[in-house]
Image: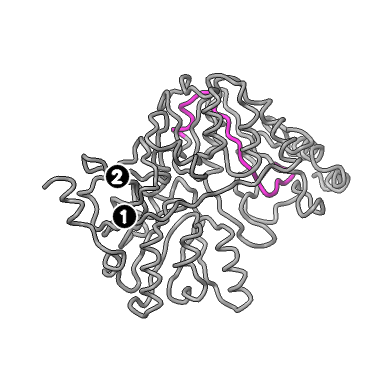
Amino acid sequence: MSAAEDYRSRLVSAEAAVAGIAAGANVVMGMAIAEPPALLAALAARVEGGGLAGFNLWYFHSLVHAAQTVLRYELLDRIRPHCMFLTAIERALIRKGDAEGRRPVEFVPTAFSAAPRLLAACVQPDAFIVTVSPMDRHGWFTFGTSNDYATRVARAARRLIVEVNPNMPRVLGDSLLHVSEVDAIVESATPLPDLAFPPPSAEEQAIAHIVAGMIGDGACLQMGIGGLPNAVCALLGDRRDLGIHTELMTPAMAALIASGAVSNRRKTTFQGRSVFTFAMGDRAFYDFLDDNPSIHSAPVDIVNDPRHIAKNDGVVSVNATLEVDLSGACNSEHLLGRQYSGAGGQLDFVRGARASRGGRSIIACPSTARDGTVSRIVPALAGPVTTPRNDAQTIVTEYGAVDLDGKSLRQRAEALAAIAHPRFRDELARAIP
């Protein structure tokens, strides 16, 4: 049988594809841009119509298609979301549930790098549903923007259902999936989410200038999400021979590649290629990724493995946090008494960068929150520790940078208080142990 014949033999409607999912099943959903809209709509319709009593939904990082279908509040008495990284979608659901005495979303703490093992071995999914790029003439799809846990879970799920979307870029690397591995194929041409990242604030711009000053030629970069990392990338166009080994690929990093600053020639692993595990951006960015031989997609348990990160020299990891205590411990996921996001891959890259020869881990944040009324540098964290004090290295606010290595608790506290907002420095000084 040819690849094209094999494809046609597996092609069904979205409704038929999800018809075999039984009540109580563990269904893993492709994350972020790889959410499969037609399959999610069919699942939601089946639950709403009474054809499916309910199921467990497992995922990282939801976007609009999930919000409009399987994460509709009125369905969450039957669909049970198990989320490992909250977004505004889950936060809104949780607030509504709190007001009504319900718990509509279960948060599952885990490092992003552990997600493939957790989902494949612990959850043991009954079905995996995900968007993929179109098949080539040899029978191969790619996981496009979202390798993350998809590559591993696709092979572990009892049933693999793919939604083929011509808008999903064909991304090279360890991202191939053969038609013979797939149980059902659904076609959909839904436009991919077109995401715009917020511009950096004045404080973030100031921080970006400090951070950029720590990044020299030949550095291997990991950047987090948001206005700050984008601002840092915009300041690096005059560097030479930069490398990229990052969890998240963004338009800002694509622009840095296009500027000529990135060659990846000094890297030890995947030399000559920019490595990532998932990507989010706009249409022009997806076109940049499509069939680009300089881009390499790999599973998150490879990309985020500190041992693998550290094989490259000069790794510079730049991530944001919500609060830092006077010992250097960082809470990057919990806000105002509630889970806000998740641990993601922050600690993996902190440890990987620190273990890299000549590497540096940078955690940055504006000095205040809530219109300047709250200090982000605090005597004690109000939430869980995302990056322990033993691992934190360089902390940056708009008032400067502190290298914690070799400093005692008192020295750390004094240095961190000095880069807090001036309004809070006296209060923090009184709290120094």
Whether residue 223 is in magenta: the answer is no
Question: Horizontal and vertical percent for residue 284?
Answer: 49, 40
Stretch in magenta: 307-329
Name the residue carrying label 2.
Answer: 141
Question: Horizontal and vertical percent for residue 16?
Answer: 26, 67
Between 266 and 240, the residue placed more toward the observer is: 240
Sort mark 1 into few (<14), some (14-19) or many (20+) by Cα contacts within 10 Å.
many
Element at badge 2? strand
Residue 358 vertical position relative to residue 352 in the rendered view, above or below: above
The answer to which image quadrant residue 9 occupies is bottom left
Please, what is the three-letter code of the amino acid marked with disc 2?
A: Phe
The span from disc 1 to disc 2 (Cα, nearest Å) is: 10 Å
Please, what is the three-letter code of the amino acid marked with disc 1?
A: Val
Q: Could you tell whether 147 is left or right of 342 in the image?
A: left
The furthest residue to the left: 1
Sort mark 2 into few (<14), some (14-19) or many (20+) by Cα contacts within 10 Å.
many
Quadrant of the rendering where the C terminus is positioned = top right
Question: Horizontal and vertical percent for residue 242?
Answer: 54, 23
Residue at 35 percent across and 48 percent down: it is 166
Disc sitting over residue 301 in the figure: none
Coloring applied to the structure: one colour
